[in-house]
Amino acid sequence: MSDNMYKTADLVVTEGQTVELEITDMTDDGKGLGRLSGLAIFVAGAVPGDKVSTRITRLKKRYALAETITLLEASAVRVQPPCPYYKDCGGCSMLELSYDEQLRIKRKNIITKLERIGALEDPTVREVVGAVDTIGADGGQAGQIGRPGKSEEFEETGQLEQIESAGGTASEAFDSMLRYRNKAEFAVAMTSAGPLVGFNKRGSNKIVDCTDCLLQKRATMAAANAIRNLLQDKLISVYDVRHGKGFLRGFTIKVCEGTGEMMLIFTGTAKHLPNAEKVIYTISDAIDAVSTEAEPYFLQSVVVEVNKAKDVREPATAYEVVAGSNTVTDITDDGMKFEISAPAFYQVNTKQMSKLYAKVREYACLKGGETIFDLYCGIGTIGLSMATQAGMIIGIESVKNAVIDANRNAVINGIVNARYYTGRAEHVMPRLLDKEDKLFVDYIDENAPKIAILDPPRAGCDEALLRAVASCEVDKIVYVSCNPGTLARDIKLLGELGYEFVEATPVDMFVATMHVECIALIQRVKS
């Protein structure tokens, strides 16, 4: 280890300095990582294996930020990104990497987090369950976006202008690997040049105007482009933050692959959608125009999410159904039906979701009769997928509307051994098992094994919840995480509470991005 490892950044480099680096790793936000005299330098526009000339743009105490000026030697895992917005948007942080390399980095990232944060020694992490059935059985080569090219000059902005590709792009191969998202959240703005409809640039409030995101369904983009035209024609006004006027603050599109149903959610400042009839017919016609026998999508529901808060990230105050039904229904590969309301959470990659739930069931290893505590249960998807093999499913969720959805989903799937409760799991779960409490439920076989399914948001589990789960002496925990860092943190605490990590399996739910879903098996240590 270099003696300079612990020096402050300003003792190694200066802002504006040009340095040459070999990129050895990748950060969670898609930057390349190189080192100079032991100092970590995070480089925009670089991937592992690159040799680059970079300009230092910012100094922190223990690291520096840089941008790529010249690609001196391209990594062997580089491919040509097919997206024209790639250098501006930043949403697909791994689109310049072969698929095999994407999976390798994601698995390595999980292992590193489990070791450094979770204090685990040589943790067992299985190979990533990739989207191989959609890109070829060779694990990536059939759908590979291109092959490494020779070194090319970067623009002053640090973005790659051109990398030599083999034989051009194969759009069918791209589409089979991409266009997997069943949910898109669009940002909007009005400028002197016209409306912007797209996505926020990474780490910025600036909107990248996007007419075709390759992660989204064609029907999704057709609807978004129709909304751009409606904004241009002033049939809908964009909310002006400075003056507090206007209607539209953004919109969300949900797509059900199993049925073709689509839901459009306008985030607006009032319950009433301006020029509703014209707006809805225009968008519906745009979707119909791109609908095919293979992708037979249609607009089933239009909802206004009312949000008058200064910060649009604040919870909505109401959901008003403008047209169609108040939910859309999806059918999974294994025949499960799920009704999805406007605020409901649903995994964004439907095909990979089936693989994810199959791995959860494998880790649960149900023999029949077990009590499953489905915590952070949402609309009940994970627990209900296990119901035929379990004795009882008990779901707990703090969002009331999600609990309503979960109960309805149990009914439409003919599942009678599932019960759902509204509240914080750390409060509700112990009471359900306490014979002295009025919430005690006597339909649970107290001798049956208890398994907890945890599927928290990116922030991970509340410490109180983990302590409650341990106090209830569940025999096994299957933890579904979209954030390796908080997963590792929670595994460390569970270790202190009498549980041991067994193994984990990542599932690539987010192709071309640094995000990855991970299922961990955790068991109680027997006395």
Image (cartoon, grey):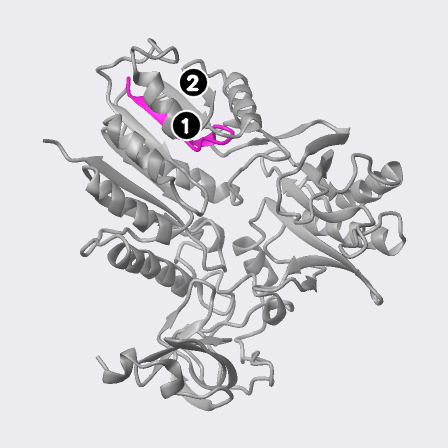
Q: Position of residue 96 (x, y in %)?
A: 50, 70
Task: Locate residue 354: give its quadrant.
Answer: top left
Residue at the disc numbered 1? 383
448 or 411: which is nearer to us?
448
Quick check: 32 left or right of 473?
A: right
Q: Is residue 510 above or below residue 208?
A: above
**Cα distance between the residues tagged 1 and 2:** 8 Å
Amino acid on which disc 2 is placed: Ala
Q: Earlier in the sequence, mark 1 or mark 2?
A: 1
Amino acid on which disc 1 is placed: Gly
435 or 447: which is nearer to us?
435
Q: Is residue 496 above or below residue 213?
A: above
Q: Position of residue 134 (x, y in %)?
A: 49, 51
Is residue 215 inside the magenta stretch? no
Residue at the disc numbered 2? 418
**What residue is rendered at 49% in x and 34% in y?**
333
Q: Is residue 93 above or below residue 359?
A: below
